[in-house]
Amino acid sequence: MIAISREARARWKDYALLMLALLAAYSAVWMFTDKTPWMHTVYCSYALQAKRWLSGHLDLGQDYPWLELAIYEGKYFVSFPPLPTLFVLPFVPLFGVDGTPEYLITTAVSLVGAIQLLRLFSLYCDDRRRALAWALLATIGSNFLLIGYNGDVWLMAQTCAFMFTASALYYAATDAEKDGRWPLLWLACAVGCRPFNFVYLPLVAVLLIRKFKKNGLTVFDALKRHWAWLIAPACVGLAYMALNAARFGNPFQFGHDYLPEFTRSPDHLQFSLSYIPENLRDKLFRLPVWSEGRLLFPKAGFAFFFTSPIYALGFVRLIERVIRRRRGGAPLPVAPLAVAGVCVSVHLLALCAHGSMGGIQWGLRYTIDAIPAVALGLALMLDDGHEGLTGFLLTPTLVFGLCLNLVGTLAILNDWPIFL
């Protein structure tokens, strides 16, 4: 009989509580909409791609007008980065495309991502209940509630990227030298779901250097000892490039430039720096509007810190730690914190260079991609053991975020009249 330590039992209890909380929130969505955890989505680009891969083809063989497909040399291709296809691949031979449970797959991936964030917070927060609350704030207390159960192609990709990014940051942040083998691999997988997540490579690098220094290694020593850890992420990156080259003749082209909306209107760019000022003003920082005695929300996206209050609480924590430091408190981990802030800022600006910023939605779903890095920054600022004002605000902020995002998710799915 295997003996399980008290610490391990407590840890698994926390994982179970976290998963139950997420499933409870998702169940509320399933109960009050036409969604179910085992349903197949009509936006099944990954299942269609998996079916064709299994038959030895890279293209889809025909057009599916309701999907965002790249059209290149008369053939139709999935225009999204490919890695989430691997999650549905085992199900397609068993159940067929129409029986693939994308919602269940996405839900399972979201639970893993939430657990990785809990593990991340637990590195710096000795109070198990507080660490659990922080993990909940980063998931169902944020705009992540909109996507974490949803198997539609866009949202499955985001959920997978969220999970892989959270995993990369957790393994980079631990003190264990052996954990250094995982961060670059998981980040490479995240890029295969959401390419802009590549922006967190400097953050992972800084965390790894910090880890190796704690273990008495210089960067040169670490590279000399662990060079083999670079092989797996390099192979993943080369696989992406090979797939892109085989499909589009360009190792850096995954297909979005060949969507009809861009090829038919050459002046309609997918990405442009000219979009940034408008998206900052009308999406990233746009607030809901009080009109005729009720609050109305823009349907094309609005203030990211409103639906994902972990951003706001992270800013409050930073101010709090700076003030405490000036009064003789514990020093801040300046290097990883600064790099995290720069990476998140660059990521948000890059997202604002996109023409649609996510289309019709609740909140601003693209900004969900940066939450794992925001969670890391927040966790790094909990290392002094004194949460102060931030700790006082945690519970009401979590309740606010959960209620707001649950109501908003139900509203967008049921088309309630609360939108502009």
Image (cartoon, helix red, strand yellow):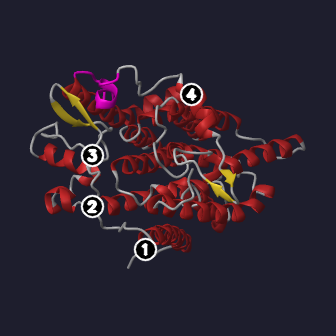
- Kind of residue indicated by mark 3: Trp
Disc 3, SS: loop
Q: Residue under label 1, please give it.
A: 31
Q: Is residue 233 visible?
A: yes
Is the Cβ of the residue at disc 3 closer than 8 Å to that at disc 1? no
Quarter of the image containing the N terminus? bottom left
Residue 276 marker: 4
Q: Residue under label 3, please give it.
A: 66
The 10 Å Cα crowd at callout 4, few under 14, some 14 to 19, many 20 or more, is: many
Image coordinates of residue 250 in percent, x first then y, are 26, 21
Is the Cβ of the residue at disc 4 closer than 8 Å to that at disc 2? no
Q: Earlier in the sequence, mark 3 or mark 1?
A: 1
Image coordinates of residue 21 in percent, x first then y, are 52, 70
Q: Earlier in the sequence, mark 2 or mark 1?
A: 1
Q: Residue under label 2, please give it.
A: 40
Tell me which residue sits at (45%, 76%) in the image.
3
Image coordinates of residue 210 in percent, x first then y, are 60, 37
> In the image, is residue 260 part of the stretch drawn in magenta?
yes
- Kind of residue indicated by mark 1: Met
Q: Earlier in the sequence, mark 4 or mark 2?
A: 2
Q: Earlier in the sequence, mark 2 or mark 3?
A: 2
Spatial distance from mark 2 to mark 3, Cα to Cα?
Answer: 15 Å
